Image (cartoon, rainbow, N blue to C red):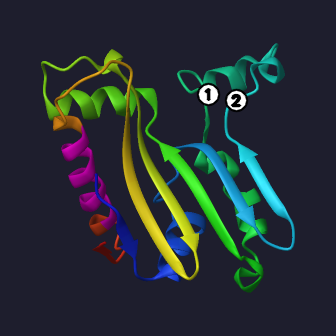
Amino acid sequence: MVALQLTNEQQFLDALLKNNTFDNFLLEEATIFSLATFSIDGHINESLLKGDDEKRAMFEGCDCLPFSYLKKSFAAYFADPKLIHSYQLTMKLSTENLIRTIRAIDEKLSPADYAGLYMNFRMQNQLLTCTPGVSHLTFTMDHQVDRAWDHMTEVFLKQSGLEYEAL
């Protein structure tokens, strides 16, 4: 497991709120500490989708909302970054991308053994970090997926133009 410090917070916020860098990630949860504390549970409330086939199709295969669906709300929370004391975001790959990623790591691995591939972002005390994480559904001594996901996270940040350094 690696911890990465993103060295330019404004660059990250632009990627998050103005670009489509994180649009395909699912937001599992977020907490924003400002004048008030905002806690967001990204899990889809299935009862609100009953009878709305269009929305149901839009979120098919997702247990959490795509960040693109929540981006405007986040832009409002971050309208004045000087008022943000700290925040944390937990994002994960969609089921489709999880399957594709696990198979790309090793064809022999079963995607059903993994609950999620995560990127955890935390800004606290003027330090913005990204910690990749893997949620295993079965115990394993093999950390191949963990190491590969750490590497893939670094590649993603680099390709997205986000400056970072290892902690």
Mark 1, residues whose alpha carbon is within 10 Å: few (<14), some, or many (≥20)? some
Q: Quadrant of residue 65?
A: top right
**Residue at left offset 82%, top offset 13%:** 51
Is the residue 80 above or below the residue 58 in the image? below
Disc 1 + disc 2, Cβ < 8 Å = yes
Mark 2, residues whose alpha carbon is within 10 Å: few (<14), some, or many (≥20)? some
Q: Position of residue 39 (x, y in %)?
A: 76, 51
Instruction: Say how many tags the image has.
Output: 2
Inspect this view and state whether residue 81 appears: yes
Inspect this view and state whether residue 25 appears: no
Spatial CA span between label 1 and label 2: 8 Å
Q: Quadrant of residue 102?
A: top left
Mark 1 is on which residue type?
A: Phe
Is the residue 136 above or below the residue 87 in the image? above
Is residue 153 on the magenta stretch? Answer: yes
Q: Position of residue 98 (x, y in %)?
A: 36, 31
| Nearer to the camera, 103 or 53 | 103
Q: Which mark is residue 59?
A: 1
Residue 74 is left or right of residue 37, and the answer is: left
Mark 2 is on which residue type?
A: Ile
Q: Which mark is residue 44?
A: 2
Q: Main secondary structure of the magenta part?
A: helix
Please state the extent of the stretch shown in magenta in the rendering: 146-157
Question: In the rendered image, which quarter contains the C terminus?
Answer: bottom left
Q: Which mark is residue 166?
A: none
Q: Position of residue 126 (x, y in %)?
A: 56, 82
Q: Quadrant of residue 46?
A: top right
Tag nearer the camera, 1 or 2:
2
**Residue at left offset 34%, top offset 67%:** 4
